[in-house]
Amino acid sequence: MKRTHFILLGTFLLGAALGSGVTSYWSSLRVETLLSFLPASLPQGSAPVADATQPSLPRQSETASPKSPALAASLSSPQALTSQAGQGTVVPTALPSSVLPSKAIPQAMVENALALATGPLPTLPFAPSASSFILHKMGAPGGPTLLVVGGIQGDEPGGFSAAALIASHYTITKGAVWVVPDLNLPSILLRNRGSSGDMNRKFAFLNTTDPDYATVTRIKEVLTESTVDLVLNLHDGSGFYRPAFEDKLHNPGRWGQSVIIDQEDMSAPRFANLQGMAQTATEDANKKLLHPEHRYHLRNTHTRQGDKEMEKTLSYFAVCSGKPAFGLEASKEFSTEYRSYYHLLLVESFMRQMGIEFTRNFTLTPQGVLATLNSNLMLAAFDSKLVLPLDNARTSLSLLPFKQGEAPALQASKPLLLMVPEKDGTWRVAYGNRTLTRFKPQFMEFDNSLPSLGMQCDTASPVTVPLGNVVGVRDSFTVTVPEGYRVNAIGARKEQNGTEAGVELFQKDFLPQYSLDKDGSTYRVEVYKGEAFAGMVLVRFGETGHGPSTGALTATSGPESVLGF
């Protein structure tokens, strides 16, 4: 008799990344206001807050292609990733009426995964919002608190990717770190510097009619909270900053590979020596350069002496509010994983200087960053009736069930991962400023009467599988449902009497163009009561599922700004 190959891959994909003890809460995503992501669509409300007493967990980001010839020489084989994860809670506070407590996550993977078939669904820790940025609070109050901001300019993926990694893959064991990975989300989704102008030039004065007014006002409130001790604003800048002119790419007019301060020091309770801290951070980063060309330099803009542009920035607003603040720039000559690598080197230096202690669950190399950004990508909606594994998604999907008259409340495995409606009626699954896939919704009534279905996979005994799971199958499977329900295995061609319930299905029975993944191995098995959608289970053929993509992250079309901070 064959060994059982029935594996709850949904739990497997998330288990290692989420660890134990994570409680997550889900908030509604009011996406119908974002049909075009034009400035007029921006919200006037406050931002949700994700509060993590130790940290949050996995999410993600974006990219560009490497331009510097030095990068090729510095590539090495990917490093092995560790599986340590933190604990915490994710509490979006803006929409309390829609908050639902999550179910527990199984603590360990069991070799006989059949035991998990009747257990709780895996939990996705992030509740993305297209209507406002989300503040993630990690660690414990009482110690030093660092605020990290990413995504103020949407064409700078190294910064918002690094911020997302901190929010999702770091554990703060002493002190606190607050993270905003998606400050200007409409700009990130469109991959431009600012959908309604450069947000990093709106902190000195801003008219109440400006589309960015609500966002800028909210982040100012966060910046000036008494708990915040120091602010880091993450950017990607052009070329390589050098104090003296070397050539067109390396000169004082460039911004990449610099740590920016507005003045040497300031009056603050702690961390007042801006120049000293910035110098230490550059020295720490320069100890781990991948190529000598990547060397970091301190850049003092002497803003108070009349730099009108820098007077408008987030960091200078923070300094004027008594908060030590720094701009961190990684070069736009790099691909995203290299930019984020350097950002994280700098952020970790500042955390050590502040006395903040932390762990991370991946190896800090460009390869480790890339693998972490690309792994465990999953979205769920409508209380997990709709589930989408996205690690290897096809560029377009067939019709997906959407509840009539209701915007989807999303659960995501990573920050910056969400669904966005387009003007032509399709929906885009976005990961930062990348598009993972597109689909057309099929609006219908939903039925909530069926929590699970029966499955027999290969030669294993029949089991009960909760709707919303991803099931691994070696050769074949058969689905059973109660009377009054019908099964539609999307792409299969073995319907009997209007249903595929009770029919043994093999991979050869499915048309590959209906698969969710590029390998043609993952298919939807949908259940209906009459014409109402009751839920789905995903079936993944093959003893082992495909892994995360391994190539460099690809950028969406459109040039990045040649500007910097």
Image (cartoon, helix red, strand yellow):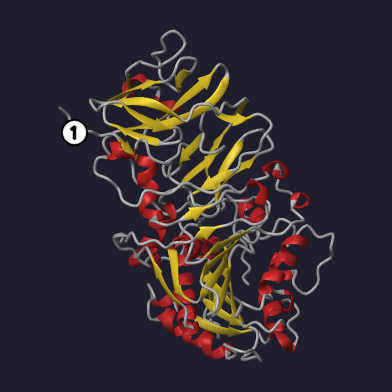
Q: Which residue appears at 33% of the width and 59% of the height? A: 83
Q: Which residue appears at 45% of the width and 19% of the height? A: 487
Amino acid type, callout 1: Arg
Query: Residue 362 placed where, x, y %?
Result: 36, 63
Q: Nearer the viewer, residue 520 or 379?
A: 379
Quadrant of image for the N terminus: top left
Q: Nearer the viewer, residue 293 or 14?
A: 14
Task: Tell me: 273 left or right of 521.
Answer: right
Is the residue 525 above or below the residue 253 in the image?
Answer: above
Quadrant of image for the C terminus: bottom right
Q: Nearer the viewer, residue 496 or 154?
A: 496
Task: Tell me: 255 left or right of 318.
Answer: left
Q: Which residue appears at 33% of the width and 40% of the height? A: 116
Answer few, some or many: residues within 10 Å of disc 1's Cα (few below 14, many 20 plus, some between 14 and 19).
few
Please count the marks in the image: 1
Is the residue 55 above or below the residue 97 in the image?
Answer: below
> Which element type, helix, strand or loop, lies under badge 1?
loop
Q: Is residue 457 visible?
A: yes
Q: Is residue 239 visible?
A: no
Q: What residue is shown with label 1?
A: 3
Is the residue 383 above or below the residue 491 in the image?
Answer: below
Q: Nearer the viewer, residue 380 or 79?
A: 380
Is the residue 221 above or below the residue 40 in the image?
Answer: below
Query: Residue 364 placed where, x, y %?
Result: 38, 67
